[in-house]
Image (cartoon, rainbow, N blue to C red):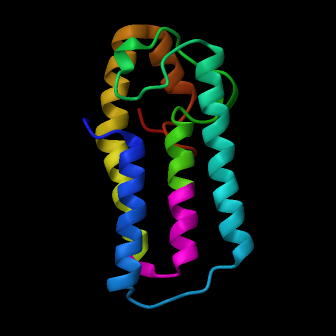
Amino acid sequence: MNIPPLAQLLAGLALAGLLATYLPLGVFDAPTLLVVIMALAGGIFLLPAVFSFVKHETTVNPQSPSQATTLVTDGIYSITRNPMYVGMLLVLTAFVLWLGAPSAFLAAGAFFLSIDRFQIRSEERFLGQNFGKNYEDYTKRVPRWLIVRTN
């Protein structure tokens, strides 16, 4: 996909804000502690993922997966194949909870579908081409997201 994931996250945040403001479909009060935990969880996935790529001296740029020089499978990457996207989704969900409008969840759903269907699948094609059997074995061990195992 040609839209960088960070831009997709920003669009998701903006869409959530617009939906909460102009089409809230009700309101709810999420506990502040839940919002904080969700946002921190997002950071717990995002930061180690970036540091792993730096440690392994491979590209962090999701727009150029063909430039990956190392298949990172340790650390946070042993829990999910896409910790950066999990982290982004958690941050977006924290924002949606903070907004307190049910309609804002549509933005989180749209972000998830966009990242899953277009960004991740495109990256997976390149990783499969670049790393062959090693990548195939990795996809069998570690889920794309967290719990849901999809190859």
Which residue shows up at 58% across the image and 18% down it?
72
Determine whether, in the image, residue 23 is placed left or right of residue 100.
Answer: left
State the count of labels.
0
Is 104 drawn above or below residue 134 in the view shown?
below
Which residue shows up at 67% across the image and 33% down it?
48
In the rendered image, which quarter contains the C terminus?
top left
**In the image, residue 52 lies at what x, y percent?**
64, 23
**In the image, residue 3 lies at what x, y percent?**
28, 40
Near-viewer residue (23 or 110): 23
Q: What span is in magenta?
A: 91-103
Q: Quadrant of residue 142?
A: top right
Decide whether residue 97 is among the magenta residues.
Answer: yes
Near-viewer residue (105 or 99): 99
Is 62 drawn above or below residue 130 in the view shown?
below
Determine whether, in the image, residue 56 is placed left or right of residue 33.
Answer: left
In the rendered image, which quarter contains the N terminus?
top left
Q: Main secondary structure of the magenta part?
A: helix
Q: Is residue 23 visible?
A: no
**In the image, residue 108 lies at what x, y percent?**
42, 62
Decide whether residue 23 is among the magenta residues.
Answer: no
Q: Residue furthest left?
A: 2
**In the image, residue 129 lies at what x, y percent?**
33, 11
Which residue shows up at 58% across the image and 36% down it?
80
Q: Residue furthest bottom?
A: 26
Q: Is residue 26 visible?
A: yes
Which residue shows up at 67% across the image and 21% down it?
74
